Image (cartoon, rainbow, N blue to C red):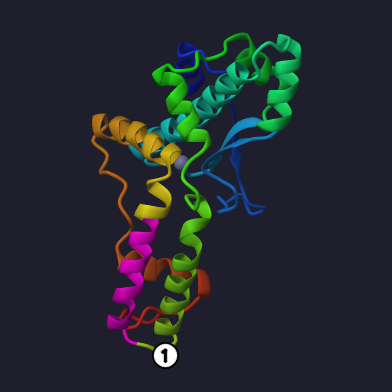
Amino acid sequence: MINARLRAVGVPEVEIEWVLGEDGQPTNEAANQFIHTQQVWKIVLKADALDDVGGGAALVYHEARHAEQQFQICRMRAADLGAMSEADKATSIAIRLDVPLAVAQEAAASPLTPGTTEYTIARNWHDPEPGRSHGGTSAEAKAMVDGIEEYLRGQRTRQSLDPLYQDYVRAYESGYRDIPTEWDAFFVSEKVGDKLGVERDTMPPLDDLIAQVAKAKGLPVPGSPAR
Ligand SMILES: [Zn+2]
């Protein structure tokens, strides 16, 4: 279904790949994201990604929007390559922007026009401000997880986690959601989600994070009944 939508806006179709662990359970690895290389152009989904129907649809639209963004960036590059032959443009786009040749060929055949809004938006997706990358949240996320583990082991208080949580949320919002491609993709997925009555994706509450870390580390949550 998502491919029909992509085709409708002129974007090459994506492959959909489902990720399962050896035990047949969903894994956390490299899932729920759009991935492009010279070999692949695909959306990788966890096995349970669509269990929540509305949220799943919003997720797929979000990732499909990343495919559309990458294609627009390829079309922008096709314009920048100027007088080169279409075949040479396609080769250059595939290598420089790390997309399959078939995708690059489609982009080379339909370059954006410099100076248009479309072109300017694609340029902004391609060259975000320095420092704006997915990596921006990792330090705060690690501090949050480490802090929760210390709490679970009785080495710090619940209350002392609050500042870590605030830093984590702030880093997520300014370091991740504000990247031009993410801001745009969340705009799309939240519109889809709103239509389907899904609550807007917000940071999980601290209690949920604590429960996740407790499960991952096999530690009991203080104050919950022992099992
Ligand atoms: Zn995204």
Dominant secondary-structure state across the stretch colored magenta: helix
Residue that label 1 marks:
155
Placement of 116 over or under 62, stated as above or below: above
Identified at 38% across, 34% down, the residue is 184
Disc 1 residue type?
A: Gln
The C terminus lies in which quarter of the figure? bottom left
Identified at 38% across, 71% down, the residue is 210
Q: Is residue 158 visible?
A: yes
Placement of 109 over or under 208, stated as above or below: above
For numbered disc 1, what is the local secondary structure?
Answer: loop
- Give the x, y percent position of residue 17: 61, 35
- Give the x, y percent position of residue 103: 65, 20
Q: Is residue 50 visible?
A: no
**In the foreground, 14 or 212:** 14
User: Label 1 neighbourhood size at 10 Å, few (<14), some (14-19), many (20+)?
Assistant: few
Q: Which residues are magenta?
A: 157-172
